[in-house]
Amino acid sequence: TLLTDSKGMTLYTFDKDKTGASTCYGQCASNWPPLVAPAGAKADEDFGLTKRSDGKMQWTYYGKPLYRWINDRAPGDMTGDGIGGVWHVAKTE
């Protein structure tokens, strides 16, 4: 099963991330916006939180930071899957 945000947009993981920490900043984060958690968000068994360098909290799934892809236009789009061989659709385990 694919993971999506609250609007049904596909979520992705980045192979270059270390478990629990994002390495996607600057232009990378412009193209792959991190899934930022609202203030007061709480982690659970599957979904966690990691602190970004700007102090915002980003959702993780089993320690892998989650992102959207700027070129996905509608719910269900998965145009970012496989880009550069390092971006992958986030799926439930």
Image: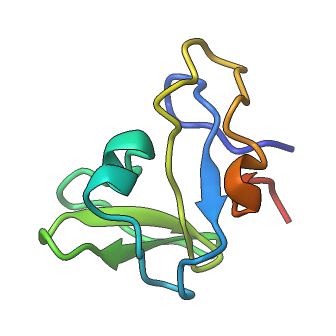
Q: Where does residue 66 sit, x and y in percent of width and height?
A: 53, 58
Q: Where does residue 21 sit, x and y in percent of width and height?
A: 43, 82
Kindly identify the residue that appears in the image at 53 percent across and 37 percent down.
69
**Considering depth in this image, is 76 or 42 the residue closer to the camera?**
76
Left or right of 63? Residue 78 is right
Kindly identify the residue that appears in the image at 36 percent across and 67 percent down.
42
16 lies above or below 70:
below
Query: From this viewpoint, which residue is outermost toward the top?
Result: 74
Kindly identify the residue that appears in the image at 67 percent across and 38 percent down.
80
**Considering depth in this image, is 70 or 58 the residue closer to the camera?**
70
Left or right of 64? Residue 27 is left
19 lies above or below 11:
below
Left or right of 16? Residue 76 is right
Kindly identify the residue that appears in the image at 63 percent across and 37 percent down.
4
Q: Where does residue 89 sit, x and y in percent of width and height?
A: 74, 48
Q: Where does residue 56 sit, x and y in percent of width and height?
A: 19, 64
The quarter in which the N terminus is drawn is: top right
Query: From this viewpoint, which residue is outermost toward the front?
Result: 84
Among the 4 quarters of the image, the one containing residue 62: bottom right
34 lies above or below 80:
below
The quarter in which the C terminus is drawn is: bottom right
